[in-house]
Amino acid sequence: MPELPEVEHVRRTLLPLLSQRRIVNTTVRLAKQVWRPKGDAAGFSHRLRGAVIEDILRRGKYLIIILSGGQYLVAHLRMTGKLLFKDASAEPDVYTHIVFRLDDGHQLFYHDVRQFGGMALWDSDPFIEPPLCDLGVEPLSDAFTCSYLWPILRRKHTSIKSVLLDQHIIAGIGNIYADEALFAAGIRPRKRANRLTKRECGALIQAIRSILAAAVAAGGSSVRDYRDGLGSSGSYQFHHAVYGRSGQPCKKCGTVLKQVRVAGRTSVYCPTCQKS
DNA sequence: CCTAACCCCTGCTTGC
DNA sequence: TGCAAGCAGGGGTTAG
């Protein structure tokens, strides 16, 4: 469940290690994880040969590796995906589905137990086409304001939690940070989006900003699977107020935290601190 | 257009 | 102790 903070931390750990490295060989061990050209392991590997990694960007939960020659390697880790920087002697295990060998002998492993993630190779600007062009605002950018979010909330009849998880509205929030932000803003996950007050909208934006920033600084949350580019855990899970704490006392008021299903996701909240 | 449900997948947890 | 069912969930797709 890498969300924005985890993906951003992966980006930051990998960038200095991969920058200016040339991909000398690519081995695809599970073709379905090559999303573009779809399932074409040979074409994917062939086109990557000799490409130099120039930069790594992030948009929402996507990583965009900028390559020489006008190519772009776009990765989405979904639930259990990892991009791991390995030395020359490392051997891929059964969950390592793509192996990139670099000119300095190091390797980059795409590792994904549940095989939900994947990588796409573009030979033109991927930002102007789906799925990247359809993503909503970056929540840590200056564009994430009440004047952006409030008009959207007013026309949404679904739960506020569904809105936070909708990548077309805000890019990068997943189940962990949706629950944490709603707790910090004092709003229950099942509350209808169009029932929020403008004050609550403002509080929610502030909560999302501060929580995501703190989580990035902590290297993300390692709940089950998430590891950064060097295989290290993050530490923000120790700061979770509600996620994964159903049945335990609220850290603010002591009330037992409740668990409900919202938008098909498990959601934990404090019945006292969060208003419906 | 909008919203909810389903599906993909494997490892871990739960319950009998 | 063993085994099966349930759960975890991002996002594309399908159904209503």
Image (cartoon, coloured by chain):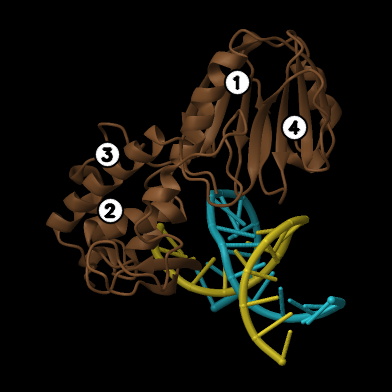
Chain colours: A brown, B yellow, C cyan
Occupied quadrant, residue A200? bottom left
Q: Quadrant of the C terminus of chain A?
A: bottom left
Q: Which residue is mark 1?
A: A124
Which of the two marks, 3 or 2, is nearer to us in this view?
3
Q: How many marks?
A: 4
Q: What's under tag 2, amino acid-wise?
A: Ile
Sequence-earlier tag: 3 or 1: 1
Q: Is residue A212 above or below residue A156?
A: above
Dot 4 and dot 2 residues touching (CB under 8 Å): no
How packed mark 3 is, by other alpha carbons closer than 10 Å (few <14, some 14-19, many 20 or more), is some
Sequence-earlier tag: 3 or 4: 4
The mark found on residue A152 in the picture is 2
Q: What's under tag 1, amino acid-wise?
A: Ser
Alpha carbon separation for disc pair 1 and 4: 13 Å
Q: What's under tag 4, amino acid-wise?
A: Pro
Which of the two marks, 3 or 4, is nearer to us in this view?
3
Q: Is residue A262 above or below residue A19?
A: below
Q: Which residue is mark 4?
A: A37
The x and y percentages for residue C6 are 64, 77
Query: In this orientation, does residue A139 appear?
Result: no
The x and y percentages for residue A155 are 27, 60
